[in-house]
Amino acid sequence: MTEQQAREQMVKLGASFFQRGYATGSAGNLSMMLEDGHLLATPTGSCLGELDPDTLSKVTLDGEWLSGDKPSKEISFHRAIYLNKPECKAVVHLHSLYLTALSCLQGLDSKNCIKPFTPYVVMRVGDVPVVPYYRPGDARLGEDLARLAPHFNAFLLANHGPVVVGKSLREAADNTEELEETARLIFTLGDRPIRYLSDDEVAELRS
Ligand SMILES: O=C(CO)COP(=O)(O)O
Ligand SMILES: [Zn+2]
């Protein structure tokens, strides 16, 4: 994919998230690795529904701002993931309604906040650890994600929202939607007893 195609894809996926209510206002940020090894990211304060391919931020893996508008304040946690997970080529962070609601619950299992009850989360994403609450932009988000990145494909920032990685921006976006819909199912099911997948059923999906 050329850099221009990458820019256009980021604009298109941002608009798609926004139009379907997964992103609102100026919350959330996207990034992807370009073929030259630099990162393309959404500018700080930008609305995912109104991105401009020509003003997207370009930064080095070391965090040097090369071109475009000022990068997201979360660029350091995006970088921490790329630096610690070589197969990761894209990162999606949203404040989507149901995952953010889930992130505000007390008593989440910090090792995996989504106990499997449908197959796709297991097949596509796996366990989702919880990162403790820090204010947006705090360097500790990057420190914690650096530690977790080698082992997981998605993370829930407590009282904030999801972070999902992928081998492409398309994959990271699809997996974010899968997780968001799963969180929606959790709230839809409410207090009704859930038949969780058994250990054998989960193992079969992972094999
Ligand atoms: O989601 C956000 C902070 O966590 C949005 O921040 P940016 O506008 O700087 O990307
Ligand atoms: Zn955020």
Image (cartoon, helix red, strand yellow):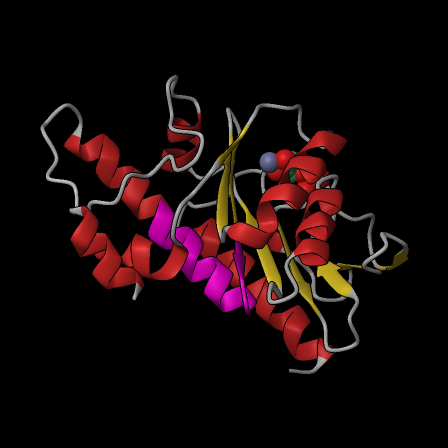
Residue 45 seen from this side: no
Q: In the picture, which quadrant includes the C terminus?
A: bottom left
Image label count? 0
Q: Is residue 163 above or below residue 35?
A: above
Horizontal and vertical percent position of residue 105:
38, 21
Is-magenta flag for residue 172? yes
Q: Is residue 196 above or below residue 3?
A: above
State the image quarter where residue 120 is shown. bottom left
Residue drawn at (40%, 36%), measured in percent from left and top? Answer: 99
Q: Which residues are magenta?
A: 165-179
- In the displayed image of the protein, which residue is found farthest to the bottom? 1
The quarter of the rendering in which ligand 1 is drawn is: top right
Q: Is residue 88 above or below residue 79?
A: below
> Magenta stretch: dominant SS?
helix
Q: Is residue 104 left or right of residue 182?
A: right
Q: Is residue 161 left or right of residue 59?
A: left
State the image quarter where residue 83 is shown. bottom right
Horizontal and vertical percent position of residue 140:
71, 30
Horizontal and vertical percent position of residue 6:
65, 73
Q: Is residue 82 left or right of residue 108?
A: right
